[in-house]
Amino acid sequence: MPFLTSIILAAFVGYIGAWYVGAVEGNFALLLFLATVVTGVYWLAERLYFLPRRRRAAATYEQNLAQRKEELARQGISQTDAVDPKASERLLMQPWWLDWTAGLFPVILAVFLLRSFLFEPFKIPSGSMMPTLLTGDLILVNKFTYGLRLPIVNTKLTEGTPPKRGDVMVFRYPPQPSLDYIKRVVGVPGDEVAYLNKRLTVNGKPISKEAMPDYFDQETMRYLKEYKEDLSGVEHKILNDESRRAGLSEAEVSQFPNRDNCRYSVEGVVCKVPPGHYFMMGDNRDNSLDSRYWGFVPDKNIVGRAFVIWMNFGDFKRIGSFQ
C-alpha cells in the first residue's frame, strides 16, 4: 500500500505541475472530484480495516505484556526488563500513507461540497469588467441561485431562479468550456439586444446612461469615459473608450451557433437571443471579448452569480458586495 499510495500521490503532483507549466489543460473540478473519491476510499479502508487491525495489534501487545508480567510474578520475579511505554501508542499511530489520504478526506470532502453546491472563489484575470471588478479582485460566486448542478457534468438538479438582466454571471466560455468567464447579463431568452454607436438598447428600449466624471485606468494610464447605466433596475457603472470604434468587422467575429440571429454593421450589432441562451457583455464595453464576438451563452454553461469581493490584496477598500 505505501508504494501504491506513492504512485497515486505522484500522479496528482505530476498533473498539477503539468497544469501549472501549461503542458496540459487543467480541470480543477475534476481534480477535486478525483481527490475526494481517492481519499474517500482510503478513509473507508482505514475505518473498516486498517484501524481495527492496528487496534487488535495494540490489544494483543497489551495482553501479551500483562500475561508476561503475571507469569514472572508467579515465579517470584518482580524485576523485569524495561518496557517502552509508548509501544502501544505507536502501534495505533496512522502511517504516513494513510495520514496523507484518509486523514485529508474530511477537509477535501468539505471543500468539494462547498465549491460544488454553495460558493466558489474566483480571481478576476483582466479588466473587461472595469470599473465594477478590477484585475486581482477575489470574488465569490453563488452556485445555487440559478439552480444546483452536478459537478463535472454540470447537469442541473434544481431549477432555481433564472438569470436576470444586470446579473454579473460566471459561465463556461462557449468556444472553450474549460475556461471560466465573467460578464454581465444584458439579454435573456427572447430579447433583442442592440449595441449601436455605443448605446445599449433592449427590446427597442434604450438603456439609461448617465455621464459621470472620467475614469482613470491605472493599467493603461489613460482616462476613459464613465457612465452610470440602469439595466432593468440594476444600476452599475460602465466605461467607453472614445478611441475605439463601435462596429465590428466580420474578421473579428467567430462563426458561433445561432450566428444568423445577429446583424453586424459599422454602427455595432443587433442580436436576437435564442431560447435557453443569454447575451453577455463586459462593463468595460470597448475592451471586452464578449457575446458580440463569440455568441450566446447556453444555460448548460452557467456556473453561478458573482456577488461579493472577499479580498483584494492591493486595495482592502474594495472588499464588499457589488452590482
Image (cartoon, rainbow, N blue to C red):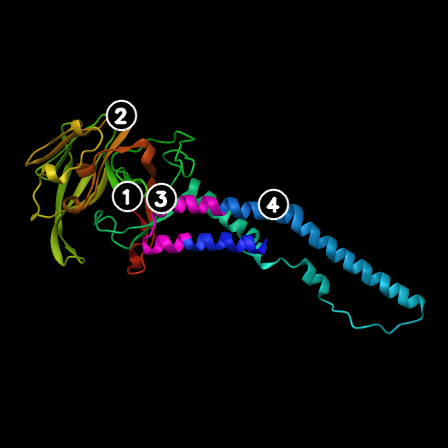
Q: Is residue 65 left or right of residue 224?
A: right
Is residue 22 rendered magenta in the image? yes
Circle nearer the viewer, 4 or 2: 4
The CA distance from mark 4 to mark 1 is 37 Å
Q: Does the residue at mark 4 contact the one at mark 1 (Cβ under 8 Å)? A: no
- Looking at the picture, tell me which residue is in the foreground, 25 or 220: 25
Mark identifier at residue 141? 3
Q: How dense is the environment of label 4, judged by Cα within 10 Å: few (below 14), some, or many (20 and up)?
A: few
Q: Is residue 51 left or right of residue 125?
A: right
For the image shown, how many numbered marks are present on the structure?
4
Q: Amino acid at mark 4?
A: Leu
The disc, 4 or 2, on the residue closer to the chain's N-terminal end is 4
Residue 43: image x %, image y %? 58, 48
Is residue 241 rendered magenta in the image? no
- Which quadrant does the C terminus fall into? top left
Residue at 16% x, 55% y is 217
The CA distance from mark 4 to mark 3 is 32 Å
The disc, 3 or 1, on the residue closer to the chain's N-terminal end is 3
